[in-house]
Structure formats: C-alpha cells, structure tokens
Image (spheres, coloured by chain):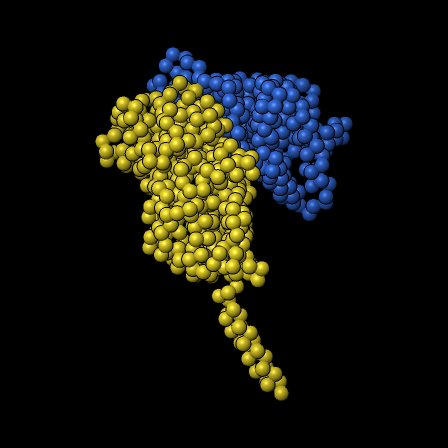
C-alpha cells in the first residue's frame, strides 16, 4: 500500500510539470491553431537560461523565473509575429495548407534552436547541483525536493493562467477570439494581438517549465525534443486546445507512467502512457475535457 | 564509317577503363605523398561530443607521426585525416556518407564510428569497398558477422559487463567488504543491455543475489521507480549503465534519497565522458570499467594526454580519443609493414601482426593482435574511479595509477 501511495505521489509531482508545459502548448494550439513542434525547444531554452544565470551570476532558479519569463513571453510574441504570422498572410487554397506550412516552419524552428544550442554549449550534458537537493521524508514516504518545488510552481502558474483565462476581460477576449474570430474582430477585439499574446504566454509557460525542470533534470540541447511527444499525448488526452484538460492530462500521464514503471516494467513506462492514450482516443475521441463537435 | 567510329570509341573506352583499373591499386597513395585515413563520426547531434573527441585523438596522432617524419616505408608520406559527419541518429545515412568518403577521397583505411549502431553500418560500407576499418565500438555483433576488413580494438560489450562485477568484487575484498547482493540497472539499448545483462548473469553464476534488475528506456523522465526498487533490495553495490543524461538523473535521485551504496558503470555510455564531472561531489568514488584511460603507463600515453589537454582545453583525454589515437598508430604500423597504402595490403598486414611496442600497442595490457574475426585477442578492460572530476585508473593493479578511495 505504501508503495502504491509513493508511486502516485511521484506521479503527481512529475505529472504537474508535464501539465505546465503542456498547458502552454494547448494554449497556443487552442487559440492560434498552431501546432508548435518547437515548444519543447523553448523548454530547453528555459533550462539553459536558468543554468547560465545560476552558474554565471549565482541567480537562484526561483528568481530566474521572474527574470526569464518576461523575456520568453517577448520571444514568443516575436516568433509569432515574424515567423508564424507569415503563413496566415499568404493566400492558401485550403485552410489546411496554412497549417501544413506552420508545421514545417515550427519544425524548422525546432531544428534551428537545437543546433544553435549545440553550437553554443556543445552536446555535453550539464547539471544543476545544490538547488533543492535531497528528498523530503514524510514518514515512510519520500518526495524529491526539486520535484516538490516543481509541483508548487506548476500549480501556482496554472492557477494564474486559469484565473486570467476565466476571470479577466483579456481572458474573455481570448475566448471570444477562439469562438468566432470574425465576430470578435467586428466588435473591436484586436485578434492579431490576441494571437501573438497567447503564443507568447504559451512560450513563457514552456520557459518556466524549463527553469523548474533544470533543477532536477540534466540539461542538454536535445532535452526538449523528447518532451514534445509527452506534450502531444497530454494535450490530446485532455482535449485538444483545452488548457485545464492539458494540466489534468499531464497529471494523468505522470501517474500512469509511474504505475507502469513500478508495477509492470520500467522500460514499458511510456508504453503505459500510449495504451491509455489509445483507449481514450477510442472511447472518447474528443479527449477527457474536449467538446464533441457536431458533424 | 559510323560503325568504325563506334568500334573505335568502344575500344578506346574499354582501354580507358582497363587503364583506370590498372592504376586503381596505386590510387590510395595520392600524388602529393599523402595517406588518407577516413574518420566517419557523429559530429552533429547527441553524440557529437564523443565523435569530436575521436576526431581530436586521430588528428593528434597524425600530427605526432607527421612531425616525426611521416611513414618511413612510403618515403615520409604524411597522414591526412578526412572526417565526415555521420549524424547521430541515422545508421543508413552513416553508411552512405562513408561510402561517398571512400569513393571521393580514396582513403586507405577508416577509423570509426564511435557509436555502436553507426559502426555497424559504417563497417558494412568499408567491407563492401574492401577498405580496412578500426573501431572503438564495443558491441559483440560487430565482429560476429564474418567481416574481413573490420578490426575491433577494445574489449567487447559482454566481457566489459562481466569484468565490472569481477573487478568490483576484487576491489571490495581489498576493503574487507563482502559483495552478497547487487542491483543491475541499464538502458534498454543493445550495447548497455548486453553489458548489464552480463553483470546479472555473472552475479547469479557466482552466487551473488541480484536484488533488482531494471532496464529503462533512453530519455527516462524520472528515476523514482528505480530508487524505490533499490531501497527495497538494499544491495551492496549498484551496477548502472546508460547515456549521460539518464545516469546523471538516476545517480542524483539515488544520492538525494540518501543511498550511499557504491555505483559501478559497466563501461561506455555516460560514465566515461567529460560531462560526468558535472555531477560534482556525487561523481566522487563512482567506478566504471573502461578500455583506455589517459593516466596508464603505456608508451606515448602520458605525452599524448598532456598535449590533448593543452590543445583541446579538456580536463582529461577521454577514452574514445585515446582509442582513436592508438588506432592511427596501429594503421601506421600496418602501412609500414605492408610498405603500401593499398587498403587490401593494409588489411592483410593488420591480420598478421602483433604490436607490443610504441604507441601502436597502447591499449591495455600493452599488446594488440587481431584474431580471425577481427577482435583484439589481448583486449583487457580496466577499472577507473572518478575523483575531483577526473577518472583515475585503479584496477587491475598491474595498470593502476591511483589508489582506490
């Protein structure tokens, strides 16, 4: 029983971080309809920013969140305006063509970021030492301090995001833009700005996830590209474009991964995720929190 | 008239092709008296650091040989290293770029390709072109395919795993410790899986209990399940293998839980790269079997290690750089013996020679002979122990440079 509780606790701690970077991915997709293949690489950028600030200036990762998040937000807006928006300006024969172009562009962006990091830092793995080191002992149970910190930061960030989306006028403009872009434009919403800001917030969340992840996960130029697969599964599991669904999907993925690793086989931990993923697609194709669209 | 022209042209072409064929055997030694050695390595992507280390080692050896007057038997011919980027992930691409390198540069031999999965296909390109290839890769399969032009310098993966256990039991005995239970953990890729399975099998054969045997997927996102298994089994030693990011994550998680059990790597993977030092204090005391280390008392090693550290601003000369450095000396010795830069003659020389002098013999135990299948018959693993960011050779005592800490 203790082993089961321990496994679930670890799953929740790991899953909260999956939820954080996946909710950024879901936000970008839900509002802009852009499938951002480079999302994981912005997680890596956050990791390197945090590591460099710690090694170069002794800045604690918690303070790095305050310093790096606005920069990541601006970077996200810049990427949207300079790169993504170009695909919307071009006249395409079909709407899917714009999405195809976006996929290729974000994939190219991913390759570009990875190779820039390889050039700048080499392929060697870097490690953050001495930050949130050790485990917290809760009777017979353990929680890794860094993962515990990641859980609290992820939960707070997600709470702020949820508040902004549901309780502020900006959140309303975002939701209005998702529901009907043309109508939103007609009533005076600057939908172009809404798209850019949404994309920026998505990238900022990826950056925060990276900063937190770097406290316990080795930093390497290709780290983020391995996370994008989990982000895809999480987002589809929770319901495409649904931010709450993405966060809960992240927790689900974390718990399933840990249960499979502990009770089935360690090397099948990701197989467990994909089994649940396929089951959800069969039983509830719109995802756990997605809305069924009428034919 | 036209028939005569066609016949003449055909005859001319046949003569031209015959002539090309006739001169082909001497093309390996270029007009500028240079012997070209191909270096197919992953120079981009996840394995780029190791691939670059191999290339650095080869260039260091070539410069040393060229400074000393070049290849004597070929009137002082200089060695030129011709690198090609195989990439890190696509063995098919590695094979095709190697085939192009052989065709374009007319290399006399190859040394490569660091990563076992790449070496498997690169060696196929070499075999098809009948060009000898020396490899630093461990995987047993390389020299189980009956290839005639492949020569494997280090011990094979299965022997490294067994050696890790044997050496650690011997080391523990010197510290009056008895190894009764071990845990074996490794990534599920071919090379590491072979090594870690060998550890488990050898432990069971010698009556040592294996408290947990875990294979994990590369790119593991959390090590809690592994640490939980370890905690339940309370082993006397942990044998751990895998790529650097994964072993870093696992070691940090083990130490975070307060588990101070000795950790031993069965060679390869992350335990022997410079990045392992990033673990700082957590790396101290960790051991790994290895095929080469830069503090061994073998000919030329000390000088090469000093130059490598200075030239490439590295804390030490890594294993793969050392093996590549030796490989260039081995090829030079074969060319001297063959008195030719012809690939087939170099391969024939490699098959029949024993090297026991100079840098060409600088693989433990100081002797190299390639058997019928291309394996180095004398290949011997060594044990290194990390301390203050540097791996020190600690076992066997015949080659050790530092005491066990």
Residue A225 position within the rendered picture, expressed as x and y whole percent measured from the top left: 54, 36
Q: Residue furthest bottom?
A: B1
Residue B285 showing in the rendered view: yes
Residue B217 position within the rendered picture, expressed as x and y whole percent measured from the top left: 42, 35
Q: Who's the residue at 73% across and 32% down the image?
A: A192
Classify the position of the N terminus of chain A by image quarter: top left
Which chain is painted in blue?
Answer: A
In the visual, does A20 lie left or right of B219? right
Residue B70 position within the rendered picture, expressed as x and y whole percent measured from the top left: 52, 53
Q: Who's the residue at 51% across and 32% down the image?
A: B315
Q: In which image quadrant can residue A96 be found?
A: top right
Q: Who's the residue at 77% across and 27% down the image?
A: A188
Q: In which image quadrant can residue A264 be found?
A: top left
> Viewer-proximal residue, A66 or B300?
B300
> Viewer-proximal residue, B377 or B72?
B72
> Viewer-proximal residue, A93 or B30?
B30
Image colour assigned to chain B: yellow
Residue B123 position within the rendered picture, expressed as x and y whole percent measured from the top left: 44, 53
Query: Eyeballing the image, is B199 above or below A54?
Result: below
Classify the position of the C terminus of chain A by image quarter: top right
Q: Residue furthest top?
A: A139
Query: Eyeballing the image, is B104 above or below A276?
Result: below
In the visual, does B4 lie left or right of B399? right
């Amino acid at each position: 029983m203790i082993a089961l509780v321990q496994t679930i606790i670890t799953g929740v701690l790991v899953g909260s971080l999956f939820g954080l970077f996946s909710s950024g991915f879901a936000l970008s997709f839900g509002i802009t309809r852009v499938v951002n293949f480079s999302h994981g690489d912005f997680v890596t950028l956050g990791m390197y920013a945090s590591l460099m600030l710690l090694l170069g200036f002794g800045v604690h990762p918690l303070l790095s969140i305050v310093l790096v998040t606005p920069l990541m937000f601006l970077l996200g807006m810049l990427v949207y305006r300079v790169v993504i928006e170009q695909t919307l300006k071009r006249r395409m024969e079909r709407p899917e063509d714009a999405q195809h172009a976006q996929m290729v562009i974000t994939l190219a962006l991913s390759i570009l970021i990875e190779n820039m990091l390889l050039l700048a830092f080499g392929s060697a793995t870097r490690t953050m030492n001495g930050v949130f080191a050790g485990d917290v002992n809760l009777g017979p149970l353990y929680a890794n301090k860094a993962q515990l910190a990641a859980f609290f930061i992820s939960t707070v960030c997600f709470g702020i995001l949820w508040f902004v989306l549901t309780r502020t006028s900006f959140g309303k403009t975002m939701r209005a833009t998702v529901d009907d872009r043309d109508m939103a434009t007609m009533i005076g919403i600057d939908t172009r700005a809404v798209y850019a800001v949404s994309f920026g917030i998505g990238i900022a969340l990826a950056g925060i996830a990276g900063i937190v992840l770097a406290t316990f996960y080795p930093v390497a130029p290709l780290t983020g590209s391995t996370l994008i697969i989990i982000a895809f599964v999480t987002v589809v599991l929770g319901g495409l474009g649904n931010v709450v669904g993405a966060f809960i999907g992240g927790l689900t993925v974390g718990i399933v991964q840990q249960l499979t690793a502990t009770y089935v086989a360690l090397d099948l931990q990701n197989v467990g995720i994909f089994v649940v993923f396929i089951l959800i697609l069969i039983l509830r194709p719109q995802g756990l929190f997605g809305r069924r669209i009428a034919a | 008239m036209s028939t005569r022209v066609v016949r003449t042209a055909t005859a001319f072409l046949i003569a031209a092709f015959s002539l090309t064929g006739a001169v082909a055997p001497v093309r390996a030694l270029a007009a500028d008296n240079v012997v070209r050695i191909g270096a197919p390595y992953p120079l981009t992507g996840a394995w780029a650091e190791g691939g670059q280390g191999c290339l650095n080692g080869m260039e260091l050896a070539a410069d040393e040989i060229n400074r000393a007057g070049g290849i004597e038997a070929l009137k002082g011919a200089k060695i030129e290293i011709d690198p090609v980027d195989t990439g890190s992930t696509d063995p098919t691409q590695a094979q095709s770029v190697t085939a192009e390198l052989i065709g374009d540069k007319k290399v006399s031999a190859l040394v490569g390709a660091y990563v076992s999965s790449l070496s498997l296909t690169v060696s196929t390109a070499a075999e098809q072109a009948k060009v000898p290839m020396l490899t630093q890769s461990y995987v047993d399969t390389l020299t189980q395919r009956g290839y005639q032009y492949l020569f494997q310098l280090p011990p094979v993966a299965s022997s490294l795993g067994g050696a890790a256990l044997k050496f650690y039991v011997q080391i523990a005995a010197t510290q009056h410790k008895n190894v009764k239970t071990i845990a074996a953990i490794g990534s599920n890729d071919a090379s590491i899986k072979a090594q870690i399975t060998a550890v488990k099998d050898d432990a069971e054969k010698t009556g040592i209990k294996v408290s947990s045997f875990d294979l994990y997927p590369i790119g593991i996102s959390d090590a809690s399940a592994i640490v939980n298994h370890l905690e339940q089994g309370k082993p006397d030693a942990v044998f751990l293998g895998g790529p650097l990011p994964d072993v870093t994550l696992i070691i940090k998680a083990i130490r975070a839980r307060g588990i101070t059990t000795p950790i031993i790597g069965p060679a390869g993977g992350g335990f022997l790269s410079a990045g392992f030092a990033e673990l700082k204090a957590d790396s101290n005391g960790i051991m790994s079997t290895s095929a080469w280390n830069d503090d061994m008392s073998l000919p030329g090693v000390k000088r090469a290690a000093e130059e490598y550290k200075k030239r490439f601003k590295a804390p030490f000369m890594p294993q793969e750089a050392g093996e590549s450095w030796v490989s260039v000396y081995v090829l030079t010795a074969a060319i001297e013996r063959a008195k030719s830069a012809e690939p087939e003659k170099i391969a024939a020389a490699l098959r029949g020679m024993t090297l026991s002098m100079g840098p060409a013999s600088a693989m433990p135990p100081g002797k190299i002979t390639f058997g019928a299948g291309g394996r180095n018959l004398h290949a011997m693993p060594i044990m290194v122990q990390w301390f203050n960011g540097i791996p020190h050779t600690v076992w066997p005592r015949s080659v050790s440079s530092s005491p066990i800490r």
